[in-house]
Image: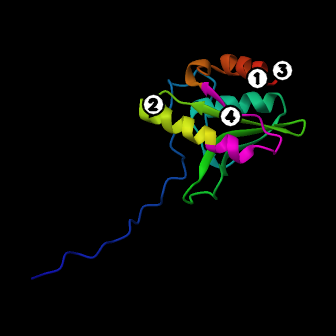
Amino acid sequence: MTFPDPYQYSTQQPSTRIERLDRVRAPVEGENFVGEIQGLPSSDIEERFARSLDKRQMSYGFRTANVAGRNLPGEVELDFAVYEGGLTYPVQLDGEFSHASEEQKNKDKANDAILDNELRGTGAFPVQRISYEKLETQTMTDAVVKELFG
């Protein structure tokens, strides 16, 4: 009886490029997505939303961990916590694929209720969900942010 060769670690260097997540469509010419916001992986709709907030010079946290710490049981991740005038506006962006099934929509509702409960009394508004269909271009996303925040 012989043992298989021992596991060998790859000698190739890992890619430093962050893979794109849940892309709606190919980027519009000139969008130049980088695949991250605040050092965390991001999708195209998340990058557009962040760019709209940046244009308006609004403060925000991206992919903030709530209820429990990051990667701990009970963690509920919030796409954007937007801070304006001492208030917090929690925003979830629903991508085309990751929020399409009925099961995922039910999970989203449950997580929103958990977040709303967790943020109650902190000056936060209820979670606002925005569908990818409203975020397909930067112009559309800018209009959504203007509508949300005036």
Residue type at tag 3: Gly
From this view, report whether residue 66 is shown above or below residue 9: above
First in sequence: mark 2 or mark 4? 2
Distance from the alpha carbon under mark 3 to that under mark 1: 6 Å
Residue 71 falls within the magenta-colored stretch: no
Q: In the image, is residue 119 part of the stretch drawn in magenta?
A: yes
Q: Secondary structure at mark 3?
A: loop
Name the residue: 81% across, 45% down: 122
* Separation of residues labelled 4 and 1 (CA atoms): 12 Å
Q: Quadrant of the N terminus?
A: bottom left
Report if residue 120 is visible in the image.
yes
Residue numbers of the magenta segment? 114-130
Could you say where residue 119 lies in the image, as x and y percent from the top left?
Answer: 74, 45
Q: Are marks 3 and 1 in contact (CB under 8 Å)?
A: yes
Residue 127: mark: 4
- The residue that label 2 is drawn on is 97
Residue beneath disc 3: 150
For marks 2 and 4, give the one nearer the viewer: 4
